[in-house]
Image: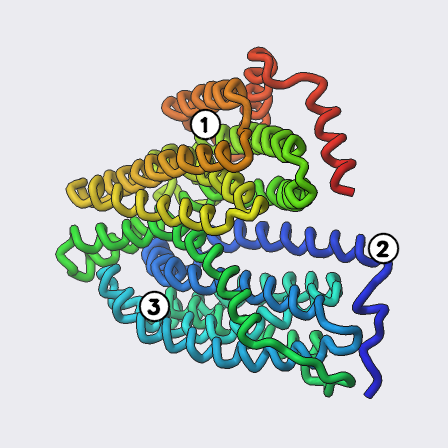
Amino acid sequence: MSPEPRTEAAPSGTSAGKGGLAILGAKVFFILTGLVQQPLLVHVLGLGEYGAFSRILAPSNILNNVTVSASIQGASRTVAGAEPGAEGSVLRKLMRVHVVLAIALLVLLAVAAPGIAWFQGAPHIVPGLLAMACVLGIYAVYAPLVGSLNGRRLFVRQAGLDVLAATLRTTGLIVLGLIFVRSGFRGATGSALGALFAVSCIFPVALVVSHVLRKPAVSADFDRKAYLKGIAGLALAQFFTNLLMQVDIMALGHFLSRSSDHSAAYTQQADEWVGVYRSCQLFAFLPYQLLFAVTQVLFPLLAKASSEGDHEGVKRLVARGLRVGLIVTGLLVSVVVAMPRSLLRLVYPEQVAERGHHALHLLALGQGLFAVLGLCTTVLASLGKERRAAAITGVATLLVATLGFVLVPQAEFGETQLQRMATATTAGLALALVLGALAVLRVAKAFAPTATVARVALAVGLAFALGTVEPHVGKLVTLVMPVGIVLAYVVVLVITGEMSPSDLASLRGLRRRTK
């Protein structure tokens, strides 16, 4: 059989540009489906089963996200470095490694499922966790196939798989969850099986699209130990970040269940409150998700400047990148903290808005700090300090968990526990951000200007104060309010001298450097 055409492995500049746009579009589609998916699950499953499903997702997503991210990056890098025509041979050999990893990960989560359920005080989530263990196993052999497409720069195929996977997942979660609810079974278990159904459908498609089933024309050597070492490093960097994103909701579930009498009624209520907190996370995580574009621009620029020994260039990029990141984060956080009740009411039932708006008011601040912390760890990683970045994220996780165990157990069951957990999360992330900022100052000799930090804090503080007296408005007004808040935020920064016409010129210069 002839080698794979090099037109696929090395597309023209125009094709690569189209592929990049396709990947970006797929990422936007993924975020949008997530925003639609969560409110739909509340309406389909009911708040209690949605909370139970959130308890299933929190621990399983830690391993899922780490496995997918590390596998895609590792396979992409390995396949991209293969000799021309030998990509298929390398892919087949690394897939043998991933089959073993898949079995190990599946067994790991399956064995851990009873312990996770015990910690959560929720034995009813064990079947769902077992289903997610199977999902994890399939992801471990699906993700490297996606990575191989990326390594061969087949970006349009990769984007197509991403879109199809997101669509199948949303459909599976909703449809099977609804079927289980209407049949008198637990909707959370049904949605977990829906996730398994979706990944089981997309995996055969990935096998075909990646051409892994074709016999390779050229044989190639493959260093199994080096590959495992590489993806282990990638996994470690991702593990603490994903653990930090889930530790608060897992701790909250633990406290809610432990403060109840374990009757069916209290178990239902505990699940409902977890569901409320998960609903708050949907909006609170938006700054972190949307700041992804800044990190994607900042990382390669810093890495290049550092490799060239351009210390002054590193300092300028760090100061500029963190300044832009702070302003963007402050804008996004301001919208959420100024109208927490209205945002929840926009997509969730009134019950969720009334129970969760105080927690969202606090949690949005914390996750805004998390977004800036993500910028700090990106700076450290791009300057070769990956372990220090992972250590700071690990400390942040420990701080959030410790403060949660101090503040939440004595709180009254329900809304007060949510507020205490949001307070613990915000305080822990604030302390971790101080550590991250100090680390960046030490390594890069630069940080965002102090004046910028103060001005953004002032603008966000005014928005937070507005959120404490948020009026009851209709959904139509809710859609218009963010525009007014954004304008007010910009006005504050202009009045205080933070924003000027030169900012536009700076952004244009940054854009030219990325081309």
Please identify the quadrant where the N terminus is shown.
bottom right
Colour pattern: rainbow
* Residue 286 is at least partly visible in this image: no
Res. 127 in view:
yes
Of the numbered discs 2 and 1, the one sitting upstream in the chain is 2
Vertical relation: 356 (above or below) 250: above
Q: Is residue 295 left or right of residue 262?
A: right
Q: Type of residue at label 1?
A: Ala
Q: Residue at x 31, y 47 (%)?
A: 398
Please give the residue where the numbered disc 1 appears in the rendered image.
338
Residue at the (62%, 79%) spot, across then down: 204
142 in relation to 257, above or below? below
Disc 1/disc 3 C-alpha distance (Å): 36 Å
User: Can you give x and y, in whole percent of width and height, for residue 64 in the image?
Assistant: 47, 64
- The residue pinned by badge 3 equals 186
Residue type, numbered disc 3 = Arg
| Label 3 residue SS | loop
CB under 8 Å between discs 3 and 2: no
Between residues 241 and 19, which one lies in front from this camera angle?
241
Q: Is mark 1 on a helix, strand or loop?
A: helix
- The residue closer to the viewer here, 480 or 141, is 141
The location of residue 49, given as percent across then percent down, is: 35, 60
